[in-house]
Amino acid sequence: MKIYIDFDDVICETARHFVKLAKELFGIELPYSEVQFFNLQKAFNLNDAQYEQLMKAGHTPETLLAYEETPGASKAINKWIDEGHDVYVITGRPFNSFEPSRKWLDEHGLKRAPLYCVDKYGRENYVQKWTYSMTLEDMFKMDFDFAVEDSPSAFEHLLHFPKCRVAVFDRPWNKNAEFPGKNFIRCNGWEEITAFV
């Protein structure tokens, strides 16, 4: 089986860290449970300059390496790899965040999981032809049987894999999302995800 796994808020607790950053940088106190939008600019009601500052702060190597692991993620992923499944970490992080992201995975016991930075949200100004960077069109040439994703903005991308079952990692910003197909199911954590598989 070929498995797609998103990185942020699936393998690590990115949004929880951004809640802290928004408070440190701008004095915005928004509980994690009230982060209603995947778009953090909208979630924290930031102007363009503030949003750019937040994103830069959230993607420094030191910050990326400090994110906490989502409970059960490494254990589940390694179990799938041990069973012979092909697991790919597919992230929408900026291409230039690859090295610390790769280091984080390695430090959390996921050296065997390949990492690809995909321009999921049209944020990249130009595409580098690195072995780990992809456009959406590149990703659509791949094939997946199962996916774990939290972002409603990425759900439509997974429709390009018609046989793919999708575990939607339950997060505040996808509580009210409409799923685009019957193959999408909400899972509250890695135990439910592994049971779904």
Image: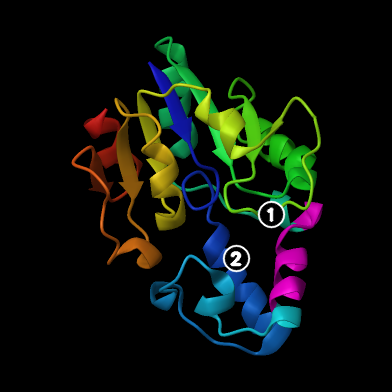
Q: Quadrant of residue 41?
A: bottom right
Judge the density around disc 1: few (<14), some (14-19), many (≥20) Cα neighbours within 10 Å.
some
Q: Position of residue 89 (x, y in %)?
A: 55, 33
Q: Where does label 1 land, which residue?
A: 66
How far separated are the C-alphas under marks 2 and 1? 9 Å
Q: Does label 2 or label 1 sit earlier along the sequence?
A: 2
Judged from the image, the secondary structure of the residue bearing numbered disc 1 is helix
Q: Which amino acid does label 2 sit on?
A: His
Give the residue furthest to the front.
Answer: 137
Judge the density around disc 2: few (<14), some (14-19), many (≥20) Cα neighbours within 10 Å.
some
Q: What residue type is labelled 1?
A: Ala
Q: In which quarter of the image is residue 176?
A: bottom left
Say which quadrant the C terminus sits in. top left
Q: Where does label 2 land, which residue?
A: 17
Magenta region: which residues? 51-62
Q: Position of residue 2 (x, y in %)?
A: 43, 19
Q: Position of residue 170 (x, y in %)?
A: 33, 55
